[in-house]
Amino acid sequence: MTVLPKHRILHLSTQPTWRGGEQQLYYLIHELRLRGFYQHTVCREGGALLTRLKQETLCPVTPIGSGILNPLTVACVHRAIQHCNPTVVHAHDAKAHSLALLTSVIFRHKVPIVVSRCVNFAIGQSALSRYKYRHRLIRGYSCVSDTVAFRMQYATLSNHTLAMRFI
C-alpha cells in the first residue's frame, strides 16, 4: 500500500510562455517541495514551464493541449487528478480556472479549487462568469494586491477566502 503525503497539490497552468505568473509558480513549486508537499503540475505542451519543470524534475508533469474545451485536454486533467489524488487544485490563470471547474463538473470531482488572480480587470457579469467565480468548489482566491482582492470580493460576494500575496 502506498502512503500519500498529507498535502497534495495539483497545479494547473495554461500559459505557453514564461512570464511573471509562471516564474511565481516555479518558485512556489520549489518552496513547497522543500516543505514536503507532493505536487503534480499540468501545463501547456511545448510551453516554457513544462520545459523547465522537466529539466529540473521538481515534480511530475502532465502536458495538455491549448484548447480548454478540447475533450482530450479535459481528459488529461481528469487523469492527473485521479493519479495525484490532490487535496487541492490550484488554478494559476483564468483559463486554468475554467479548465479546473469544467473537469470537476464533468467528472464530478469534489476536490477544492484555489485560484490565483493577478489582473485588475472587472469580472464579467454573464451567467457563466457568475457560475465560474461563485461555484461551491472554489474555496479561495490568491490575489496579487488589495485592489484585485477588492474586485474579487465584489464579484464573489465575499463567499470565498481572499488571500493577499504580494509579488
Image (tube, rainbow, N blue to C red):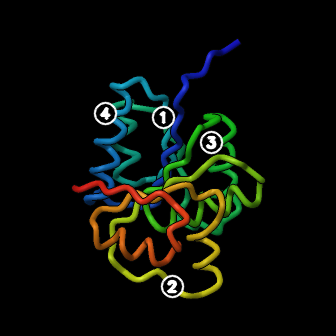
Q: Residue at x 43, y 72 (%)?
A: 152
Disc 1 secondary structure class:
strand
Q: Quadrant of the N terminus?
A: top right
Q: Which residue is mark 4?
A: 31
Cα distance between the residues tagged 3 and 4: 21 Å
Q: Residue flagged by tag 2: what amino acid is it?
A: Gly
Q: Residue flagged by tag 4: what amino acid is it?
A: Glu
Cα distance between the residues tagged 4 and 1: 11 Å
The mark found on residue 80 in the picture is 3
Q: Which residue is mark 1?
A: 39
Q: Which residue occupies the extreme left position in the image?
A: 167
Q: Quadrant of the C terminus?
A: bottom left
Mark 2 burial class by Cα count in 10 Å: few <14, some 14-19, many 20+: few
Mark 3 burial class by Cα count in 10 Å: few <14, some 14-19, many 20+: many
Question: Which is more N-terminal, label 1 or label 4?
Answer: 4
The mark found on residue 124 in the picture is 2
Q: Position of residue 149 (x, y in %)?
A: 36, 68
Question: Which is more N-terminal, label 4 or label 3?
Answer: 4
